[in-house]
Image: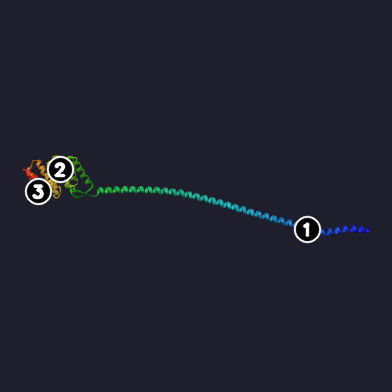
Amino acid sequence: MACLFMKASRRPAAWLLALALAAPAAQAGLFDDDEARKAILDLRQKQEQSEARVKAAQADSTAQLLEQINQLKRSLLDLNNQLEMMRTEMARMRGQDEQLTRDVVELQRVQKDIQQGVEDRIRKLEPQKVTVDGKEILVDPEERRQFEDSMAVLRKGEFAAAASAFAAFNRRYPGSGYNAASLFWLGNAQYGMRDYKEAMSSFRSLVSVAPDHPRAPEALLSIVNCQMELKDSKGARRTLDELVKAYPKSEAAQAGKERLASVK
């Protein structure tokens, strides 16, 4: 019995010893777990803080990027507005250029018309070369017009009007290159009116002022015709003699010789 008791009494002691020995180890294991959990919590906290910083940085970066994008959009909008304004201005300037081109063309046309008008007026004032009875002369445009108008009236057979026109011409242009021709046709107009004395005066004036004129022999022959109409045979013979002596080779002289034979 004593052995059994001793054995029994030894078991609790051994257990207690074992428990006493195991307690520090258990406490050490428990302490290690707390530190590990604390370290994990610290790591989690740091990770969360890091993630928060990253998210904040990303948010800031996103905000900055959005702001940059908005600024870029505003810049693009401003640029588009500027481009549109430039297009509008260019269109306006193009329109001004086109209008300016039209104005220049119109001014050139007006200038051309004015220049043409000035040249026409100058031509009307400048002496012109004309040929009358085979002779070239210089006459004023108005002088030429009045002479040609007088000739046109004579061609119509309006002798009185033609005589007035040629007489007016001679008074207005006494030194004209047309003067001898005008006297000749004035005499013809007067002859057509049967105003033989005035006709002889006109023909005689031609011979006096322009004896070398191609119409001078015809003027003398016309005087002969007037004298014969007036029944002045002696005068007609004298004029025929004058014609033949002054212009022996002229056609009028040949015609005068034939006429002289019939004049008594």
Q: Residue furthest right?
A: 1
Residue 18 drawn above or below residue 120: below
Question: Are discs 3 and 1 less than 8 Å apart at CB?
Answer: no
Q: Residue at x 9, y 48 (%)?
A: 244
Residue 189: x and y, percent? 16, 42
Can residue 181 be seen? yes
Q: Could you classify mark 2 by the number of other residues whose Cα lies within 10 Å: few (under 14), some (14-19), or many (20 or more)? A: many
**Image disc number at residue 244:** 3
Q: CA distance from mark 3 to mark 1?
A: 176 Å
Residue at image position (36%, 48%) is 105
The answer to which of 211 and 143 lies nearer the viewer is: 211
Q: Amino acid at mark 3?
A: Val
Point out the image quarter for the C terminus: top left
Of pointers 1 and 2, the one earlier in the residue sequence: 1
Instruction: Using residue 147 as the reference point, say whether residue 90 is left or right of it.
Output: right
Q: Which residue is mark 1?
A: 29
Kind of element beneath mark 3: helix
* Residue picked out by circle 2: 188
Q: What's the coloring here?
A: rainbow
